[in-house]
């Protein structure tokens, strides 16, 4: 089984995706309220009780807001590294069923192999994930999905994640000119966004993708777009020619910013 992948939403208002394989049904991040997440899941025919686990990249609210509400479904385990789990648990009254992993150490959950890799962002211990599954045969081809959001630059360890993914979700957070001219954000916030522990611009993401040697991409999702400082058409114009120039066919999807 190749799996089913559905991005429920991705922007500074919230990030969450559903991944289904032959033996697993998980959420990647939980950046919307529990109630809203349940509603979005039901729209695609999934009940919260059907979830086998929730994987959290870091503690920022747009990636973890649903932990409180989803944790009332007692059987759902939440996977996070220690700093992220402790940071979130300290804000919650209900004890969450945490499954703590170590950043940089691969582990297995059901039929999924998970590699959590540290990323440069202004959080306790943020990670990106590479999920792998399948027996690599005719009936169950090997699949690799990478979830790479919230990073100010791309370190060497993350380049290996980008290269191994056949489905890659990567942020294209802002257009540099739009951020510079934005009147809502103070200079200090602009500097945070542009910093090496902030977010990737369209240009920075394009440079990173161009630097990947022998990529395996079949699908590229451009995610975490700023509602005020980016636009779907700009992302399409930036990455469309690049995707067309790839040696093998690549399906490009730009994830529109989710409304607040």
Image (spheres, rainbow, N blue to C red):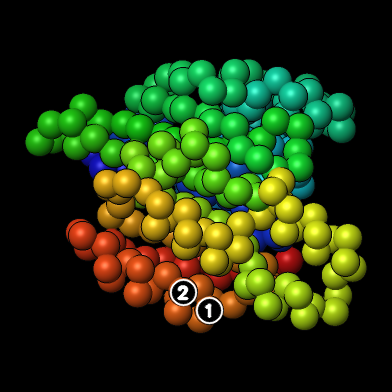
Label 1: few (<14), some or many (≥20) within 10 Å?
few
Taking the spot 55% from the left edge, 40% from the top edge, the residue there is 155
Q: Which of 121 and 136 is in front in this view?
A: 121
Q: What element carries label 2?
A: helix
The quarter of the picture where the C terminus appears is bottom right
Residue 181 position, x and y percent, is 77, 80
SS type, badge 1: helix
Q: In the image, which disc is placed on residue 238?
A: 2
Figure quadrant of residue 130: top left
Q: Name the residue under label 1.
A: 234
Q: In which quarter of the image is residue 191?
A: bottom right
Contact (Cβ within 8 Å) of mark 2 with mark 1 = yes
Horizontal side of 254 relative to 61 (left or right) equals: left
Left or right: 1, with 62 as reference point: left
Task: Tell which of 134 and 93 is nearer to you.
Answer: 134
Residue 69 in sight here? no
Residue 179 percent location from the top left of the image: 73, 73
């Amino acid at each position: 089984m190749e799996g089913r992948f559905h991005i429920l939403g991705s922007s500074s208002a919230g990030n969450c995706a559903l991944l289904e394989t032959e033996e697993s049904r998980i959420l990647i991040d939980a950046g919307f309220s529990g109630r809203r997440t349940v509603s979005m899941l039901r729209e695609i025919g999934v009940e919260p009780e059907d979830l086998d686990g929730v994987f959290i990249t870091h503690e920022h609210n747009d990636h973890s807001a649903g932990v409180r509400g989803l944790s009332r479904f007692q059987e759902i385990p939440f996977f996070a590294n220690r700093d992220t789990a402790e940071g979130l648990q300290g804000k919650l009254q209900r004890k969450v069923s945490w499954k703590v992993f170590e950043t940089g150490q691969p582990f297995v959950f059901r039929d999924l192999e998970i590699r959590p890799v540290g990323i440069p962002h202004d959080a306790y211990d943020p990670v990106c994930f590479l999920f792998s599954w399948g027996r690599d045969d005719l009936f169950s081809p090997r699949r690799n999905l990478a979830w790479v959001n919230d990073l100010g630059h791309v370190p060497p360890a993350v380049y290996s994640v980008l290269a191994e993914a056949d489905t890659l979700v990567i942020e294209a957070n802002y257009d540099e000119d739009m951020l510079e001219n934005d009147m809502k954000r103070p200079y200090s916030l602009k500097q945070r966004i542009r910093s090496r522990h902030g977010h990737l611009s369209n240009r920075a993401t394009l440079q990173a993708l161009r630097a990947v040697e022998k990529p395996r991409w079949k699908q590229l999702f451009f995610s975490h777009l700023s509602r005020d400082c980016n636009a779907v058409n700009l992302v399409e114009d930036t990455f469309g020619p690049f995707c067309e120039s790839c040696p093998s066919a690549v399906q490009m999807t730009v994830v529109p910013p989710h409304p607040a």
